Image (cartoon, rainbow, N blue to C red):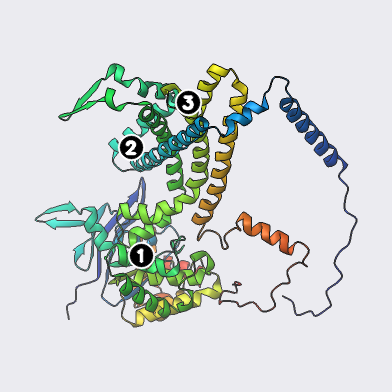
Amino acid sequence: MSTRPMVKSEAVHKSFGRLEVLRGIDLEVQPQEVMCMIGPSGSGKSTFLRCINHLEKIDAGRLSVDGELVGYSERGERLYELPDREVCKKRSEIGMVFQRFNLFPHMTALENVIEAPLRVKGENRDQAVARAGKLLERVGLADKVKAYPNQLSGGQQQRVAIARALAMQPKLMLFDEPTSALDPELVGDVLDVMRGLAKDGMTMIVVTHEMGFAREVGDTLVFMDGGVIVEQGNPRDVLTNPREERTKTFLSKVL
Amino acid sequence: MSAASAPRPEAIKAIPVRHPWRWLAAVAVVGFAAEAIYVVATAPDLRWPVVQHYLFQVRIGLGAVATLELTVVAMVIGIALGILLAVMRISPNPVMSTVSWFYLWFFRGTPVLVQLFFWWNLPLILPTIGAFGWQFETVKYINPFIASILGLGLNEAAYMAEIVRAGIISVDQGQTEAAMALGMRRTQVLQRIVLPQAMRVIIPPTGNETISMLKTSSLAFITQFGELFRVSTEISAFNFRIVELLIVISFWYLLFTSVLTVGQYYVERYFARGSQRELPMTPWQRLRRMLFTFHAPPPQPPVAQRRDDSGQAF
């Protein structure tokens, strides 16, 4: 079966000023695959995620989602920058969950979830509300529909954030250290939701420090350091038998 | 909480520390203020009956209405144009941000009295403005009211622009990112996500500006617009009771600013949604609570609070 990869990255480079954060990233994520990314902070994991939905522009290389270049269209030999409208449309097909939740504090949980379906997709309100209710139920927050974010715990906020991303019916979900800002006892609920998503066949890229999650749910594990992929493969293999010295050093510190 | 079931010890009863200096300072300040009021109130040449006569006089009333009108219209222009200027200022288009910068530089850099007088005298240099095939006769349209709202409104816009910009900057960058990641357009992000949150920062200084505008509107006397101050000078020009009329209009200015202060409180309360766990009580609620629970025992800690999975009380 020759399926088109959901994400394809070829020699992706990205610099902030003089600092080169990504120095040639090559990887492929297949549909329904769960890829976990680990690595020390500053290794470029988050930047790479942000490149995928064009929150950051790449400087060199090729990056495509679902067979289409991110941020550009290609006609003949030339690249044309996509107009805002197109970029927004493509972003709307990719869900993103942030380390710091970034829920809209002036809106209730429900309003957070229906905002984008209403404004971006122009969905009918009743339909959006009905679906948002189901999504909030799915993440275990059916009784928090009317709560404002600051009335929710970190774990609950993050689950609302996941529901908010899912409301756009994305074909790909990006998780940027979704549990790093949570108290340890709240991590489980969020991981449970993500586990459920993976089981339902969502394509996911998860930047995480949760090695247990990576081992159990991830199909592939990527270890990044210094803007390059040091090692990638089956999570069990990478975690138990790392080939590279740098991977070993990193794992010995976090495990 | 520990499982210890020892009985709660008796509440502490201690002799409070005495503060004689506080009392002394309070007496001194109150005495001084009372003396000052007494001296002014009993000034030999101050005619209180004149104050009383003009306080609710029709001309003064019309002047008060004109002052309010001017304040409202100038603030509406100032806020609308201020938001536009703030958005231009942070726009990725360098021409936009530069134009906005120059606007601020000019209108904040010249006295508002000068600007008012300029608009009033615009027909002197430009009796007609012809542009883009339009012919606009300034002589016909520049009347005292128009000159006043132009002078006050355009000046205010420069200050409001900075207030709005401060509000926009104060909103966490993550909010914009989250909204963009959902596919929202720049204008949508601004309108739906950033501005509503910026409001919390924008409102208090805007209230300040409104109160300030109410008083600055008195400078519109220079355009011969009949607001409170101009009316008072017109009356005192023939009866010479200058101070009495100043007291009269001060009464109205104070009344209006007091009302605005209360209004600001409620607007702030509205925009505090989502930023405070519980809205602050209105003055009325506070008064009622003070009256009815003043002598009541301190509230008992709730016995069985429902706790959510995070251990946070709800």
Q: Is residue B222 above or below residue B217?
A: above
Identify the residue position indicated by label 3 in the image. B219
Q: How many neighbours does mark 1 have within 10 angstroms: few (below 14), some (14-19), or many (20 or more)?
A: many
Q: At which x and y percent is residue A148?
A: 49, 66
Q: At which x and y percent is residue B56?
A: 56, 34
Specify whether disc 3 shares its chain with disc 2: yes
State how many labels appear: 3
The residue located at (25%, 20%) in the rendering is B127
Identify the residue position indicated by label 1 in the image. A115
Nearer the observer: mark 3 or 1; the answer is: 3
Q: At which x and y percent is residue B264?
A: 53, 47
Q: Secondary structure at mark 3?
A: helix
Nearer the observer: mark 2 or 1; the answer is: 1
In this picture, residue B46 sits left or right of residue B123? right
The residue located at (83%, 78%) in the rendering is B6
Viewer-proximal residue, B226 or A200?
A: B226
Viewer-proximal residue, A222 or B152?
A: B152
Q: At which x and y percent is residue B74?
A: 41, 36
Q: Is residue B7 above or below residue B289?
A: below
Nearer the observer: mark 3 or 2; the answer is: 3
Q: Secondary structure at mark 1?
A: helix
One can see residue B265 in this view? yes
- For badge 1, the amino acid type reads Glu
Q: Secondary structure at mark 2?
A: helix
Q: Is residue B54 above or below residue A185?
A: above
Residue B97: mark: 2
Give the Cα distance between marks 3 and 1. Answer: 46 Å
- For badge 3, the amino acid type reads Leu
Residue B11: mark: none
Residue farthest to the bottom, as pictured: A199
Residue farthest to the right, as pictured: B15
